[in-house]
Image (spheres, rainbow, N blue to C red):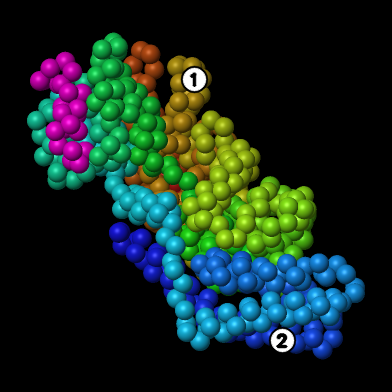
Amino acid sequence: MTNKRAEFLEKLRALQQEFVHSLVERLAQLKNYEQRLVQQWNPEDLQQFYISIHTLAGSSATFSFNRLSQSAKRLEEKISPFLQSEAPPSVVQQQSIKTAFLYLENLLDTIITHSEEPYLVVDEDLCAIVDSIQQEEQTDDNKLILLIEDDTVLAHSIAEQIQAFGYRVNVLHDSLAIKQCLLQEMPCALIVDIILPEGNKAGAEAIKKIRGDYKGILPNNVPIIFISCRVDVEARLAAVKAGGSAYLAKPLDIGNLIEWLDKLVNRQAEEPYQVLIVDDDKEVARHHALILENAGFLTVICNEPTQVLKQMENGNTDLVLMDLYMPGYRGNELASVIRQIDAYAAVPIVYLSAEHSSELQVQALLQGGDDFLIKPIRAETLVRIVAYRAMRFRKLRNLMSKDGLTGLYNHRHIKEQIRNEVSRAGREESSVSVAMFDVDFFKQVNDTYGHGIGDQVLKNMSRFLVDRVRKTDLVGRYGGEEFVVVFPHTSVENAATICEKLRSDFEKVLHFYQGGSFSVTFSCGIASYPVFDDPQLLADAADKALYASKNNGRNQVTVAGL
């Protein structure tokens, strides 16, 4: 069992014990409602009594107290027919309710008195997800590429350009040292020439032998990109049989190679999905948050329904996971409130409730919900459904916020991000820098090589920026050949240092066309908050600094105000 899995299960057990301790207060609350109803039948007290029992039925099942859950459900079923009725139950009906309540009360007393520890149901599918998340975290910063290429000059050129995109490269000139290199440090990917001094398929044969004879040295999840001047089927089949993930013909288009590397090693993974959990039952909310967090999600818990909109304003919520019954509020009513706001009209809302009535479930869905899950729910099922709904929403949001050619934030959205970061910097009394980039002489690129090659230059530029900045930095296409990077918590001096390194590295990148290759440069302008304390002034200052760079000869970085 991995450390992360052990820690996860320990937290689940701790939450179960917290739930047991909460039963004292829950029982006192139930007794209070029951005594008030015995003294005087009151629809309002009945409603609160029902909600408390309904919540107990769902939460106890969530924490593996199945007998307690079934007892609460039996009492719930006896009460529910009177929720919409003004007339109190008959004497016989009241006695039936009393008997069911006494059974529930005795069961609660037993659990509280003996601090009964429930059986922890281990969801192996979820634990496998937790293990995979830990493995990804351990390899996330691995940027080593192992390049096996016998042409020394070509190998140096390829390595230099790959390194410009933020990778490290270890170069070998034959297949003999591959095994030893793998034992020293595992790369995130291999780039292997099919033809090596040992033979015209030696690269593929070497990889196939390593994976066959030395199992575990080269895991199957480490991608292999084969390169070659050979484009025949025999060479391509050899690469496939060796487990190749891609096959690129020489002369190499470095932009295409980097695109494959980013895709195969998941360098461009999206930010974790953020889930807002709305549930007044604190232990249950934390239970579901723990499950989602250990599957790689970010979670925010809202135990007070009136704070839902405020919580959604504070972050990019990808999904709302909401209980249907809460004191004074119903989930479907909150869903209707959320849907009144245009910005949240498409945010998926998933109900998680112990409500089994199909009629009430449909009613809740018609008032703004997207899915209805029944408590208790298997952890693995919860993870998969939440991930699917959040993924669909993020794709829709990306269509509205991303540039079609480069995949970067579009003009409107990156300006929103600048406003958000300036607002955050004001609250935290920190700094934020904005850098504008413009490809030099881009019109000449289009006129000389065609718009298709020009588009490829823009894609290479966007990929270069994304790969070289931090995950917390924001990259957008401001328009045409102009790009912008927002550096949160970064002084203008540090931003200038970063951008100068980007400038010197980007001019080494080759862009390919049918007759050969060429390189381009960019100009850059930087401005920072709080020197420019308004989002629009900040963007304008960076833009003016950019044009100062262009007017002073291009291929340079200018800082506004210096």
Residue linked to disc 1: 452
Does the rendering let one see residue 130? no
User: Relative to 89, is 224 on the left or the right?
Assistant: left
Asked whether residue 158 is drawn in magenta, I would say no
Residue linked to disc 2: 32
The three-letter amino acid code for the residue at tag 1 is Gly
User: Relative to 409, is 226 on the left or the right?
Assistant: left
The disc, 1 or 2, on the residue closer to the chain's N-terminal end is 2
Quadrant into which the N terminus falls? bottom left
Q: Give the image quarter of residue 239.
A: top left
- Residue 522 lies, with reference to residue 203, above or below; the image says below
- Viewer-proximal residue, 519 or 258? 258
- Residue 310 lies, with reference to residue 23, above or below; the image says above
Q: Secondary structure at mark 2?
A: helix
Residue 157 drawn at (x, y percent): 24, 28
Q: Secondary structure at mark 1?
A: helix
Residue 510 drawn at (x, y percent): 34, 27
Magenta residues? Answer: 196-218
Q: Identify which residue is drawn at 63% across, 71% down.
A: 71
- Residue 321 lies, with reference to residue 12, above or below; the image says above
Residue 180 drawn at (x, y percent): 11, 39
Mark 2 neighbour density, 10 Å: few (under 14) some (14–19) many (20 or more):
few
Q: Identify which residue is drawn at 14% across, 33% down.
A: 213
Mark 1 neighbour density, 10 Å: few (under 14) some (14–19) many (20 or more):
few
- Viewer-proximal residue, 448 or 262? 262
Q: Identify which residue is drawn at 81% across, 78% down.
A: 92
Residue 95 drawn at (x, y percent): 77, 80
Foreground tag (1 vs 2): 2
- Residue 225 lies, with reference to residue 188, above or below; the image says above
